[in-house]
Amino acid sequence: MTAPDPRVGLTISHRRYVPHGCAHYGGALVDGAYTLGLFGDVATEVAIVLDGDEGLLAGYTEVRFLAAVRAGDVLEASCEVVRIGRRSRELRCTARVVARAEPERGPSAAGVLDPPQTVVEATATLVVPGSVLPGSAVPGPVLPS
């Protein structure tokens, strides 16, 4: 039996404030593409850490929009490696609102959400070029300890 790949389970997260200029709909709602863009940024870091290359987020097999994202939110986007293929990596992506504007309390009021609210879940496929894979001429990455 082959030992499990130690890279499975690696999780990378980014946090970002959603600026008011990103509101696209009434009620300061932000379109779903904003969160997918965050997943792309996190997936790029995953590829850099695992493979020493930015890779390419090739697509999603599932995306679920569970709740609204609004201008003034602080989003945490995370990607966890759930499967390693020869040139592909399957990622479980999750976005949570960790803080939210509270304009009813004042123009700059905001509060931390405890617990954070999950707003988007997705499964993504990340691919890396064969030339950066172990055994190639390009040196491999160093995993964080």
Image: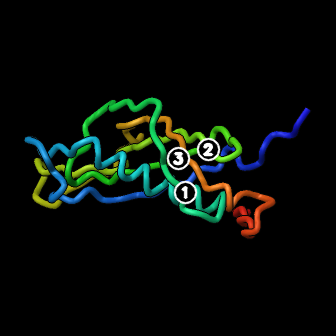
Helix, strand or loop at mark 1: loop
Q: Quadrant of the N terminus?
A: top right
For label 1, the crowd category at 10 Å Cα-Cα, with few meaning under 14, some 14 to 19 and many 20 or more, is many
Residue at figure coordinates x 68%, y 61% from the top left:
131
- Marks 2 and 1 in Cβ contact (< 8 Å): yes
Q: Amino acid at mark 1?
A: Gly
Helix, strand or loop at mark 2: strand
Q: Which mark is residue 55?
A: 1
- Residue highlighted by disc 3: 79
Q: CA distance from mark 1 to mark 3?
A: 14 Å
At which x and y percent is residue 46?
Answer: 57, 55
At which x and y percent is residue 55?
Answer: 55, 57
For label 2, the crowd category at 10 Å Cα-Cα, with few meaning under 14, some 14 to 19 and many 20 or more, is many
Comparing 127 with 109, the one in front is: 127
At which x and y percent is residue 103?
Answer: 13, 51
Instruction: First in sequence, mark 2 or 3: give its number.
Output: 3
- Residue highlighted by disc 2: 89
Q: Quadrant of the C terminus?
A: bottom right
Instruction: First in sequence, mark 1 or 3: give its number.
Output: 1
Judged left or right of residue 55, residue 69 is left
User: Compared to 64, does 112 lie above or below?
Assistant: below
Q: Amino acid at mark 2?
A: Arg
Residue at figure coordinates x 81%, y 60% from the top left:
135
